[in-house]
Image (cartoon, rainbow, N blue to C red):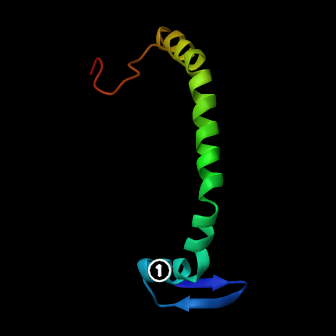
Amino acid sequence: MTIQISGSTGISECSLPAATSIFCGRGLRAEISGRQPEFEADIAATARVARRLEPYWRAMYRKAAAVDVGFARWIGQGI
């Protein structure tokens, strides 16, 4: 595998795990760790919105599942 960085060859003839460890060892882990609170806040906000929208999603899903579409929707159903 060859990895190009800004148009020049950065790594040549290495495996994906080797390339991953090289890039992760150069500050990527530190950057991710530094942004962890931001990621957690985004995940929490997404969960709050999902909880608020779940009843509407569930109603939509049940309404759609009740419509006969002329063939089995689910694997193993009617086969």
Amino acid tagged 1:
Ser
Q: What is the quadrant of residue 75 in the picture? A: top left
- Residue at point 57%, 65% (across, down): 33
- Residue at point 41%, 17% (across, down): 71
As drawn, is 46 to the left or to the right of 15?
right
- Residue at point 64%, 37% (across, down): 45
Residue 19 position (above or below residue 36) = below
Residue 70 position (above or below residue 26) = above
Task: Please state the horizontal and vertical placement of residue 8, each as a whole percent of the image.
Answer: 68, 90
Q: Say what secondary structure mark 1 lies in.
A: helix
Q: How many discs mark residues in the rendered view? A: 1
In this orientation, which residue lies closer to the viewer: 36 or 12? Answer: 36
Residue 61 position (above or below residue 18) = above
Residue labelled with disc 1: 21
Task: Please state the horizontal and vertical placement of residue 34, each as a whole percent of the image.
Answer: 63, 65
In this orientation, which residue lies closer to the viewer: 33 or 61? Answer: 33
In this orientation, which residue lies closer to the viewer: 13 or 73? Answer: 13
